[in-house]
Amino acid sequence: MTRAAHDRMANAIRALAMDAVEQAKSGHPGLPMGAADIATVLFTKVLKFDPSEPKWPDRDRFVLSAGHGSMLLYAVLHLVGYEAVTLDEIKRFRQLGSLTPGHPENFVTPGIETTTGPLGQGLGNAVGMAIAERHLAAEFGDVVNHSTYVLASDGDLMEGISQEAIALAGHLKLNKLVVLFDDNGISIDGPLSLADSVDQVKRFEAAGWNASRIDGHDPDAIAAAIEKAKSSDKPTMIACKTTIGYGAPTKAGKSSSHGSPLGADEIKGAREKLGWSEAPFQIPADVLTQWRAAGQRSQGARKDWEKRLTALPADKRADFERRMRGDLPGTLNAAIRTLKENLATTPKEIATRVACEQALESIIPAVPEMVGGSADLTGSNNTRTKSMKAMSAQDYSGRFIHYGVREHGMAAAMNGMALHGGIIPYSGTFLVFSDYCRPSIRLAALMGERVIHVMTHDSIGLGEDGPTHQPVEHLAALRSIPNLNVFRPCDAVETVECWQLALEAKDRPSVLALTRQNLPQLRRARDERNLCVAGAYEISPAQDKAQVSIFATGSEVSTAVEAQKLLAAKGVAARVVSVPCFELFLAQPEEVRRSVTGDAPVKIAVEAAVRMGWDAIIGSDGAFVGMTSFGASAPYKELYKHFGITPEGVAEAALSRLGKK
Ligand SMILES: Cc1ncc(C[n+]2csc(CCOP(=O)(O)OP(=O)(O)O)c2C)c(N)n1
Ligand SMILES: [Mg+2]
């Protein structure tokens, strides 16, 4: 391709970005104009993709980590021929119901691999995608053989999460991961020198990457640097020196081109400077033809891939296709049944984190797509089963990832693995550190991705580590995220059932909040049904017509059952409802909710956490036994007494509500 032809193709991106942002009266023209040359090289020379098959499993992944540059993606997707991304959709940039929302949303627009906007997340996702690729290649061979490209901005690299992501990628030698850094030296406040003086090349090198600097407006230099990355045994970062708002006569190179429409005069000047005489949203036929031809480049590669897929042994192919569809294997149900049968035969008084490990011993072999991990708390989270090999740069087939002390990077990488497909990632950390994962959990919920966070040490019940480690507000904070299931099982049986529900929730993430301390097994009866499925159920009925309903989760369900006995001794009939999952319960039809909630005059909730959220179940006039402050450092039984979360405390609350005290 001649330089002139390249320039015209890149200018088509610039023009569409300027025009769409102008029409929407909002958006970010600077990045698409500055990075248009990089995108043009990527999509016309490098990327393996097929616009007619956006979900082709072996496509290269392209992640625009700097999601504010969404018009870059929309322009390119339109130009290369993603049918749904029409010129009309580009004209409807940022409007309700369009395929071109403000920031890229993978669940809205075909061809978009992940939802970005919160800086740094896309880079973290891309690391997960690259891990998924290596892991699946180790399992399925050459039907999985693709690269992951990221366009990252100054902001992406300033965010702390980027350090976790690049350290993990460097350690795992993810050599098919290429980061193109839009090195424009500008962020919103102005020149980067206001706030940053990191040498990004040295930083990536220190993390085990190749890194180099090139002119990000020189297509040959871009192509050559990417070509070089292909033969490396390390991930590659290419710092592409660019001019933000390239082509804009007065705003180029300035933060004024970052995030607002350029204005009619500036756009007119840019058209002149770029030699682009077309009317708004007009793409000359020759330029469109070239772009569409670029969109057809990988037809042959796709046919070859289909041959490789057909050549797989039938069972292996079926398993690959099942995993990429996200369907669970038939073997899961049998594993769950056996686990519950064994617990009915031999009840266990164990912590739910231990129950989780014992459940995983059966679930992991039954569900080969599960890839677990922990952020350096493997022995505490109990997320690694005996047979699990660690994943390493020498052996990507391992199904357990030592994420290091990188909760945020872990959660973002898990999103990337789920997005890649073929893997159900699960993690481990302490519940209190859900705050360190929260931005990625939120995005998993928004995207509807099945990632499962095992979060142990879920209350003051962890004891001596004290208030820094004792979650108090975390359950409420997690429950406030839409489309996230927060499970808090009360014993070994509920732990198995909650695992089953988390795995079956194909379109949402889950958190399993588990205890450090031992709990009695309350569920003794054989029951093949999953009683947690409706989110709440009566676990211990009243002996008589109930005067009190006690609602509890996790470790406090056994406290509630003890309180029930104390009340019975005083002639007060109480029932206990276990609430392993608010979200599933609140989604039940009203009559189901009513029957579980019951009509006892006194409602009490018990949870070693703050009250927020419980009013939906017990009403604002219900009584709550839980935490109103941070915890403290002491043996856990003393803490429960100190904070009044005891059977006696619950019984007293009930009696006082009944006017009996
Ligand atoms: C986590 C997060 N913090 C803040 C923002 C708001 N924001 C959007 S872009 C940006 C920085 C812009 O600089 P850069 O990343 O270099 O992008 P460029 O202006 O070069 O396109 C900021 C602070 C964000 N999107 N995400
Ligand atoms: Mg910048």
Image (cartoon, helix red, strand yellow):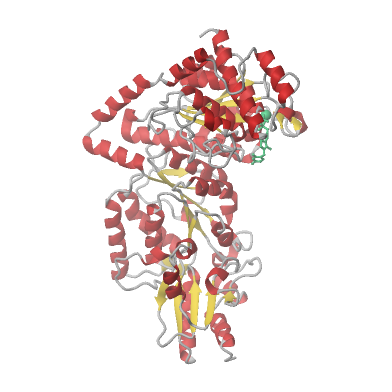
Q: How far across and down, in percent of the image, does residue 14 sit?
A: 61, 22
Q: How far across and down, in percent of the image, does residue 369 sit?
A: 36, 44
Q: Nearer the viewer, residue 59 or 142?
A: 59
Question: The C terminus lies in which quarter of the figure?
Answer: bottom right
Left or right placement of residue 413 versus residue 240 in this view:
left
Q: Quadrant of residue 397?
A: top left
Quadrant location of ligand 2? top right
Q: How far across and down, in percent of the image, does residue 189 sit?
A: 75, 34
| Farthest right residue in view | 194
Residue visible at 57% across and 27% down in the picture: 72
User: Looking at the image, how many numbered discs can be counted on the residues?
Assistant: 0
Residue visible at 45% across and 43% down in the picture: 401
| Farthest left residue in view | 314
Q: Nearer the viewer, residue 595 or 487?
A: 595
Left or right placement of residue 45 versus residue 17 in this view:
left
Residue visible at 59% across and 65% down in the picture: 464
Asked if one can make out residue 232 in the rendered structure from this viewpoint, the answer is: no
Q: Nearer the viewer, residue 49 or 328?
A: 49
Residue 372 to residue 189: above or below = below
Q: Quadrant of residue 498?
A: bottom left
Asked if one can make out residue 566 in the rendered structure from this viewpoint, the answer is: yes
Residue 488 to residue 179: above or below = below
